[in-house]
Each structure stands twice: as structure tokens, then as C-alpha cells.
Image (spheres, rainbow, N blue to C red):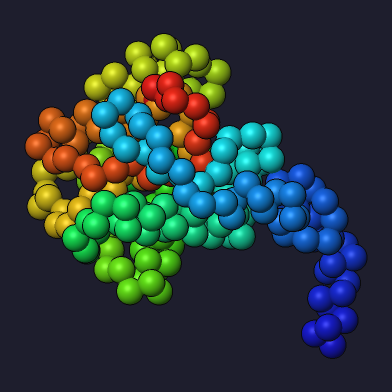
Amino acid sequence: MIKTLAALKELVYPTTCAGCNLLGTKLCNSCSETWFTPPKLNYLGESKLYFVANYNPQSARIILAAKEDGNVFCINLLARCIARSIIFALSESFIAQPVAIITIPSSPAAIRRRGRDHISQVAKQVVKNLAVENIPATYSPVIYLSKNIKDQSKLNSRQRTQNLSGAFSVKNCEIPSGDLFLIDDLVTTGASIQEGVRALANAKIGITAVITACAVGRNSLIR
């Protein structure tokens, strides 16, 4: 009976690749190459930036499915990539454990629209993935949005920087212990991350590195 229902579900809702819609698989071999490469190191200003996937139309679909559709497979894929980059950063720098994860906050409007806090969901899964590797980690959402901002989807790099200027603040709470990683699911222009770094610096909190699942693969990131 269960097999029959599963077959019927597959007939009505066939499995397709999250990146390119190829039938019969959740992630095809071609799209897998983007997400299962070794982590890369870039720089965002003076901050180290670690990421796995290069930003392209296929990876953009996976980010969108995770963020807007709540696709569990895609959310877990992003979390695994972020966890892998954290492990890579630890091995590169011989950083003392444990680690603390801080996130770039989503806007309250986005959280209401999605019915969930996407980046918090990703961060909590990252903590679980690190625990499997015996790396103690905590999630500390200490950054919050302290002013209204415009939707950034149609803004260029300069406009995004202006839009986010002074937008983030840090909660008056205990500073997380351990080495701090500032994470987001995607880095394109760099404006959100730079504003997060600024807000943390104003609160006398320094980060070890920036970690993202996916980034624009160039040396001039300015988001």
C-alpha cells in the first residue's frame, strides 16, 4: 500500500532536480558539481570569506527554493555547504573550538511572507551538522534590523550599500563565546555582510570569518 501511494505521488508530483528541473533526481550530476566542490577562500574587505558554490542560474534556483519555498532538501544542502566551509576554515587556521554562529537577519516582512525565519532555520541545521563532526557550535542571533529598508532585489551595489547603511544593530546581550562566524546563505554584492561586520565591530565583536553557501566568484565582492 505504501509503495503504491509513493508511486502515485511520483506520478502526480515527479521528482525533479532543484537546480535544472531534470526529471528523476533531487539534484542531478551536473548541478551536484557546483555544490560538492571543495570550499573556496575569497576576501570581502578585510574579512575572509569561505563558500562552496559559485553563483549561477542553477544555484540561484536552489537558493530561491530554500528561501522562498521552504524546500527542505535545499535548506539542508545549504546548511551542509556552510558546515563544510566552517570545518575547512577551522582546519586552515587551527582555530580553537567551540565556534559561535551569527547570522545576517531577515527582515520582519520577509519572515511574515515566508511564514518562517529562513536563515535561522539554516543556522540551526548547521549547528546539527557540526555536532555530527564533533565540533561544538552555538547559534547566536545577536544582529537585528534596526531600521526599515527597501526591498533589495532590484537595487544595484551602490544602492544596496546606501539602503543598508546603519540598518543593523547588535542586541545588548552576552557576547558569544568561541570563534565567531558570520553566515548568510548567499553573498552577491557584499552589502549585507559588510553592514553586519560594521554592526558587530561597533559592539566590539570581531569575527573570525564570513561563511556562505554560495557567492559570486570574483575578487571584488562588496556586499
Determine the residue positioned at 30% across, 68% down: 135
Residue 110: where, in percent of width, then height?
47, 38
Quadrant of the frame with the C terminus: top left
- In which quarter of the view is residue 167 placed? top left
Determine the residue positioned at 28% across, 34% down: 47
Quadrant of the frame with the N terminus: bottom right
Residue 128: where, in percent of width, then height?
39, 68
Residue 147 is at least partly visible in this image: no
Q: Is residue 165 above or below residue 121?
A: above
Q: Is residue 206 above or below residue 156?
A: below
Q: Is 26 or 220 nearer to us in this picture?
A: 220
Residue 189: where, in percent of width, then height?
45, 24
Determine the residue positioned at 57% across, 38% down: 54
Q: Is residue 2 above or below residue 125?
A: below
Quick check: 171 left or right of 193?
left
Residue 204 is at least partly visible in this image: yes
Quick check: 198 left or right of 105?
left
Q: Is residue 204 above or below residue 21?
A: above
Determine the residue positioned at 33% across, 41% down: 210
Q: Is 5 or 14 nearer to us in this picture?
A: 14
Q: Is 93 or 81 nearer to us in this picture?
A: 93
Count of residue discs: 0
Residue 100: where, in percent of width, then height?
24, 56
